Image (cartoon, grey):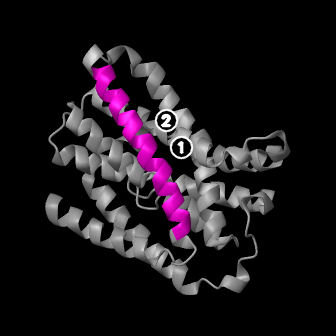
Amino acid sequence: MDIFQAIILGIVEGLTEFLPISSTGHMIVVANWMGMDENAENKAFMVIIQLAAILAVVLNYRDKFTLQKVDLWIKVLIGFLPLAIVGFLFKDVIKESFTAEVVAYMFIVGGIIFLIVEYFYKEENHHTLEVEDITYKQAGWIGFAQMFALIPGTSRAGSTIVGALLVGLSRRASAEFSFLLAIPVMLATSGYDLLKHYDEFTQEGILTLGIGFIVSFVVAYLTMMFFIKFLEKFTFVAFGVYRILFGLLLLAFYL
């Protein structure tokens, strides 16, 4: 991997990690288009730079990291557990399902689901306006929805946001809970890969990793801020349409 590729992947990771458009799907596709080898170092790079996105969440929502917010983090843990358990039990099956075709179809399916959810969305029926007001039951259902993110191309952010909308959260609260829920998910996956592959990075590899990490952090931080501003005026329809179009493009390219 060269520095240019590291910058491009850092931008892609930062832009897509918290948007409901599947960061993993985009990373796989972009890496493929740049002709990158699927070696252990490149795979580890794409997972480890997710840690930069975690730091972006911490900085953006540093007011949530206080003792007064313990109840909120219990709900985040409740939302995390279903994915953690199912992902651990079926990790081998999940790895085998990572194909361009599956990613493409799930982009389209996810886009259609967003359009349907938005069609039936009624502002007056979504009373949970702040993430602190989420109930334990809502957190559990959102965690159940997040399990669908184990299907490549589905999008972790997309699954959690759809689940949150269906149990009564506002668009903003849905997005923000998805941000916070990303922390334990990415700590688990990125931390595991870091321990497993840290010795595979050469001195040159450390440099590209550092550049990708910084780029990912900056882009993720800005993306979260603009995403919340976007949701104050607009809906998720644009993301649904984008997912369908991108999925169709992938099908045309790979099939």
Q: Is residue 159 left or right of residue 111?
A: right
Q: Quadrant of the C terminus?
A: bottom left
Kindly indicate the quadrant of the structure image that contains residue 175: bottom right
Residue 255 visible = no
Residue 62 image offset from top left, x and y in percent: 67, 44
Magenta span has 247? Answer: no
Give the residue type at disc 2. Answer: Leu
User: For the point 45% across and 24% down, which residue is it?
Assistant: 194
Number of callouts in the render?
2
Q: Which residue is mark 1?
A: 56
Give the magenta range.
Answer: 205-229
Residue 242 image offset from top left, x and y in percent: 34, 71
Q: Is residue 129 left or right of residue 40?
A: right
User: For the point 32% across and 33% down, which residue is it?
Assistant: 43
Residue 205 visible = yes
Q: Which residue is mark 2?
A: 51
How far apart in space, not on screen, are marks 1 and 2 (Cα)? 9 Å
Q: Nearer the viewer, residue 190 or 66?
A: 66
Q: Nearer the viewer, residue 196 or 13?
A: 13
User: For the point 50% across and 70% down, which residue is it?
Assistant: 230
**Where is 45 relative to 120, above or below?**
above
